[in-house]
Amino acid sequence: MARRFPLETVRQLAQRRTEDAAVELQGHSTRLRAAEDKLKQLQGYRDEYRTAKAQAMVQGMAMGRLREFETFLARIEEAIAAQSLEVERVRAAWEAARLHWVEQHKREKAMDALAERHAAQELQREMRQDRKSQDEFAARVKPGPMKIRLK
């Protein structure tokens, strides 16, 4: 009978940690996508507002209205700069989570390789034991004289 892999508990723990790291990485991926989408949205607002400002300038506008455009564009630029920093922060967290998952995955695969090696060794051990048992049985059974029957 095959003996249990002595590190099975550690192997299961490595598998659980890999799964946890994958879930964490997925969460970071979602946050990164959301941050990038928000940045693109802000950049889209800025571009729309610049276009509206250019059209208004062609048609002519009061100085107060021009200042409002400039003030609003400055605020959008600040928001874009802040969101760009947020995207970089979230991207760095995603990269750290990815590296953590890679490390956990390597550990899990190493434990799987050990388990496979253990299983192969156990199979070899069982085969040797069976062969030994068969040899012992064969040695106990002494062949008698052969009798031939003729019909």
Image: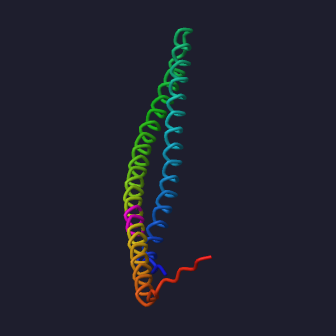
**Count of picture labels:** 0
Q: Nearer the viewer, residue 38 or 144?
A: 144
Vertical side of 146 occupied by 39: above or below: above
Color encoding of the figure: rainbow
Q: Residue 20: percent from the left, percent from the top?
A: 49, 63
**Which residue appears at 39% of the width and 55% of the height?**
102
In the image as oriented, which residue stretches furthest toward the front?
151
Q: Residue 98: percent from the left, percent from the top?
A: 41, 52
Q: Nearer the viewer, residue 14 or 143?
A: 143
Quarter location, residue 124: bottom left
In the image as oriented, which residue stretches furthest toward the right?
151
Q: Is residue 114 magenta?
A: yes
**Which residue appears at 52% of the width and 58% of the height?**
23
**Which residue appears at 46% of the width and 41% of the height?**
83
Quarter location, residue 78: top left
Q: Is residue 75 magenta?
A: no
Q: Residue 151: percent from the left, percent from the top?
A: 62, 76
**Which residue appears at 56% of the width and 9% of the height?**
59
Vertical side of 16 occupied by 142: above or below: below
* Residue range of the region highlighted in magenta in the rendering: 109-115
In the image as oriented, which residue stretches furthest toward the top?
59
Vertical side of 116 occupied by 62: above or below: above
